[in-house]
Amino acid sequence: MAARGGLNKGRGLGALIPNKLQEAEIEAPDRSSKRTSGNLAGTVNSGSSQLNSAGTSETGEDKKTAAGAEKKTEALAGSKMVRITEVVPNQSQPRKVFEEESIHDLAASIQKYGILQPLLVQKKGKYYEIIAGERRWRAAKEAGIKEVPVIVREFKEQDAVAISLIENIQRENLNPIEEARAYERLINEFGLTQNEVANRVSKSRTAVTNIMRLLKLTEEVRKYVTDGALSMGHARALLALEDSEMQKAAADQIIQRGFSVREAEALVKRLMSPAQQEKKVQKDPQREIVYRQLEEQMKKKTGTKVSIHQKSGQKGKIEIEYYSDEDLDRIAALIGGGSL
């Protein structure tokens, strides 16, 4: 298992990027600048990578050329200008899908206002590798920008990957499957626990667990989620179908008929095996209520999903899910067992 030495303690990007760097990233053009066609005053919000072009008037003065955008894109505090051809994407970038329309809108904004937040990069040979800001880089290329502002820092490889992952997760730039794989990488490659991942991306541990469960879907169904054909709610409903062919068939029907999440859940319930349905009919309702209460108590205690399954008579079984060796060690310690 990977060592945790390269990752600092703390929450989100703040745990990985020095304070001076964070300040430089969010600093905007000088407040003293006048609001002319060539300047934009005000502070850029740290959570947004570029102003949206929607809602601005399209006068002749506003229709900026790439050359005009170049004049507005100047080196911001703590950054320097480099040729866009010297900047390359990060091969470890967790985000694989970039919406063309979104990139086009951002390119239009860059043509009007320039790039308001520098890219975070590290030197790789004669090139600069993007750590954070690939979307801005793509839009700048489309806008015809020749130079872009960058902040150059040196990172250990695992820190560079972690920053890229966390930046995308925090900005909600990833689809559910990409997000699940990002969490999986943080756990498997950097030895983080699910609690530590949840803290770094400012989400609950339950939210992280639910996202990671999507990786149990078949490859075809995962692709539907990646492409946006299925929502996370639809995908979670399909997890109840253990048969891969049935899962795919149900997914196809949900897409073709435009089912809501509730309709998808009802479909899955109908498709469950007759044996499962029969067991449900024969179960003692009062006992089931007690089981559900016990499941919730055990879930809070262990920090993971716990299922109690009633069999014939008073027999049954308890299932406790884990997502890494370290997670298993943690659960084992909670119930008084040893470790791997």
Image (cartoon, grey):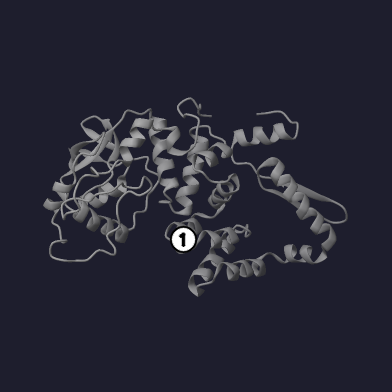
Using the rendered view, name the quadrant where residue 158 is placed: top left
- Residue at 18%, 42% (x, y): give it: 74
The extreme top residue here reads 5
Using the rendered view, name the quadrant where residue 335 is placed: top right
Left/right placement of residue 19 relative to residue 57 reads right
Res. 313 visible in picture: yes
Q: How many marks?
A: 1
Q: Nearer the viewer, residue 213 or 207?
A: 207
- Residue at 24%, 47% (x, y): give it: 115
Q: Is residue 106 above or below residue 77?
A: below
The extreme right residue here reads 313
* Mark 1: secondary structure: helix
Left/right placement of residue 7 relative to residue 112 reads right
- Residue at 78%, 48% (x, y): give it: 317
Q: Quadrant of the C terminus?
A: top right
The extreme bottom residue here reads 257
Q: Nearer the viewer, residue 191 or 81?
A: 81
| Whole-percent x, y for residue 209 in the image | 58, 47
| Whole-percent x, y for residue 298 in the image | 74, 45
Q: Is residue 312 above or below residue 149?
A: below
| Whole-percent x, y for residue 101 in the image | 30, 61
Crowding at label 1, few (<14), some or many (≥20) Cα neighbours within 10 Å?
some
Res. 309 visible in picture: no
Residue annotated with mark 1: 224
Left/right placement of residue 267 relative to residue 228 reads right
Q: Is residue 203 above or below residue 279?
A: above
| Whole-percent x, y for residue 273 in the image | 69, 64
The three-letter code of the residue at mark 1 reads Tyr
